[in-house]
């Protein structure tokens, strides 16, 4: 039950405030929630978890948008875990989850690993409270999985009914089988029929159980894939004019092509892609380059105005949009424009967008590749369909001519729906 502004939230705020009392040295606190969150992330990255907690508490006290408060509560929980206060972290996570934080973030963030391991009971209770006991998958993921295979539910029900029926039948055939073995079978009963019935019931039960298990495993696997696609859909990109769009908003308008790798790999491939820009645009393909390691940049190395704490642990209300591990993208109208493109070239506006909140993008990529650092030199690509599901993915970079040949052109109607201007 959501209790925003109620007794539970007040108790969480009071507990958090009590934790920051007694500080000996003064701490400069920004006047806005966003500023407090960004300063808190910088403190957390610098190893000052107590200062980070103070700043996140200040963000909550100041108040802000739901996104800012979500970030403040979540990152305050990470700070509490760092300080060894798991109970306080669970309470803060509830507030973040009430503000639509995906539970998958809690499962993947290494800063919460001590909480998952040390307070497994509380963590599992939190999972059951917010995502249920069916693997932790969202309602949207379940609906999309069912849409992909609408008859799976009927098959699972049929297998379950068959298994239960055979189990009930065994309750009558087993005593007869025991009687046949001991010679106590009644004269009216045929021993051969008893053994046949027993074999049939056992066969049906084992077969139905095996089919149910295989079908269920397939369902869980598909749910996992769809769940990751839904997590990806929530990630945001920034257009040239600074506007933010989630990938979900781009469905049925664009085919995002995510390229991940080192700066050397991506810079080389983006230059190659320029040759096919016209063909890619006709097919609605928009490139999202994710430079691995960009979230690890020290804030002091970034140009003034680009220090938005995207490299800190946890996540912020924005995060800097780095196009490389060492250089942040310029702000304003030049963001995301291929080199050499003119200011009025609208194709350039749709050709490439920049990832927003670099940390979240890198976390998703690492999960997709099961540890992106191992193959960072080779790169990774993920191509999405118009409706948002993954069309193709793999290690390395896609063959540009092959990609163009395999992707149909979009209709004029769809191509006219331009968002990224």
Image (cartoon, rainbow, N blue to C red):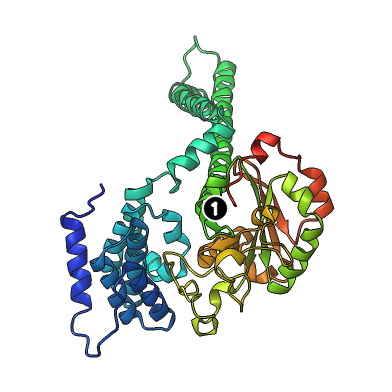
Secondary structure, mark 1, is helix
Could one spot residue 126 in this view of the protein?
yes
* Residue in the picture at 29% in, 79% down: 29
Q: Is residue 263 above or below residue 290?
A: below
- Residue 199 versus residue 391: which sits nearer the camera? 391
Q: Residue furthest left?
A: 7
Residue 11 screen position, x and y as percent: 17, 63
Residue at x 19% of width, y 57% of height: 8
Badge 1 crowding class, 10 Å Cα cut-off, few under 14, some 14 to 19, many 20 or more, is: many
Q: Residue furthest top?
A: 188
State the image coordinates of residue 19 (x, y, percent, origin top left): 22, 76
Does residue 146 appear to the left or right of 407 in the view shown?
left
Query: Farthest front residue?
Result: 344
Q: Position of residue 27 (x, y in %)?
A: 28, 85
Residue under the image location 26 percent in, 72 percent down = 58
Image-quadrant location for residue 237 = bottom right
Q: Give the total number of marks visible in the rendering.
A: 1
Q: Position of residue 20 (x, y in %)?
A: 23, 78
Give 240 or 183, whichever is nearer the viewer. Answer: 240
Q: Is residue 181 above or below residue 239?
A: above
Is any part of residue 77 visible from this angle? no
- Position of residue 332 relative to residue 350, above or below, is below
**Dividing the picture into quarters, in which one does residue 207 lie?**
top right
Kindly identify which residue carries mark 1.
232
In the rendered view, does 378 fall on the left or right side of 255? right
């Amino acid at each position: 039950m959501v209790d925003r502004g109620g007794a539970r939230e007040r108790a969480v705020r009071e507990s958090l405030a009590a934790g920051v009392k007694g500080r000996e040295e003064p701490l400069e606190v920004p006047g806005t929630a966003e500023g407090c969150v960004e300063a808190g992330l910088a403190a957390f990255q610098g190893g000052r978890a107590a200062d980070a907690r103070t700043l996140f508490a200040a963000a909550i006290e100041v108040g802000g948008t739901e996104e800012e408060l979500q970030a403040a509560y979540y990152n305050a929980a990470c700070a509490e875990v760092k300080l060894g206060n798991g109970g306080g972290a669970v309470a803060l996570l509830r507030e973040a989850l009430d503000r639509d934080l995906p539970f998958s973030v809690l499962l993947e963030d290494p800063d919460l690993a001590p909480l998952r391991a040390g307070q497994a009971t509380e963590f599992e209770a939190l999972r059951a409270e917010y995502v249920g006991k069916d693997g932790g998958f969202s309602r949207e993921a379940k609906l999309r999985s069912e849409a992909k295979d609408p008859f799976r539910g009927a098959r699972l029900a049929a297998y379950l009914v068959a298994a239960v029926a055979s189990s009930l039948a065994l309750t009558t055939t087993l005593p007869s089988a025991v009687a046949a073995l001991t010679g106590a079978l009644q004269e009216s009963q045929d021993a051969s029929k008893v053994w046949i019935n027993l074999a049939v019931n056992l066969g049906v039960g084992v077969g139905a159980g095996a089919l149910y298990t295989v079908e269920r495993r397939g369902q869980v696997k598909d749910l996992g894939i769809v769940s990751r696609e839904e997590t990806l859909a929530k990630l945001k990109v920034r257009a040239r004019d600074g506007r933010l769009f989630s990938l979900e908003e781009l469905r049925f308008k664009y085919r995002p092509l995510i390229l991940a790798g080192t700066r050397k790999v991506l810079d080389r491939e983006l230059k190659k892609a320029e040759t096919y820009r016209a063909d890619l645009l006709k097919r609605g393909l928009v490139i999202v380059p994710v430079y691995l390691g960009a979230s690890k940049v020290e804030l002091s190395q970034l140009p003034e105005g680009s220090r938005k704490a995207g490299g800190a642990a946890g996540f912020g209300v924005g995060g800097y949009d780095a196009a490389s591990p060492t250089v942040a993208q310029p702000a304003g109208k030049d963001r995301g424009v291929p080199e050499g493109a003119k200011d009025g070239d609208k194709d350039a506006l749709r050709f490439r967008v920049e990832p927003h909140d670099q940390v979240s993008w890198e976390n998703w990529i690492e999960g997709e590749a099961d540890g992106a650092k191992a193959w960072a030199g080779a790169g990774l690509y993920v191509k999405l369909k118009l409706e948002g599901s993954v069309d193709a993915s793999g290690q390395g970079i896609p063959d540009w001519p092959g990609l163009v040949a395999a992707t149909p052109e979009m209709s004029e109607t769809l191509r006219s729906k331009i968002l990224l201007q």
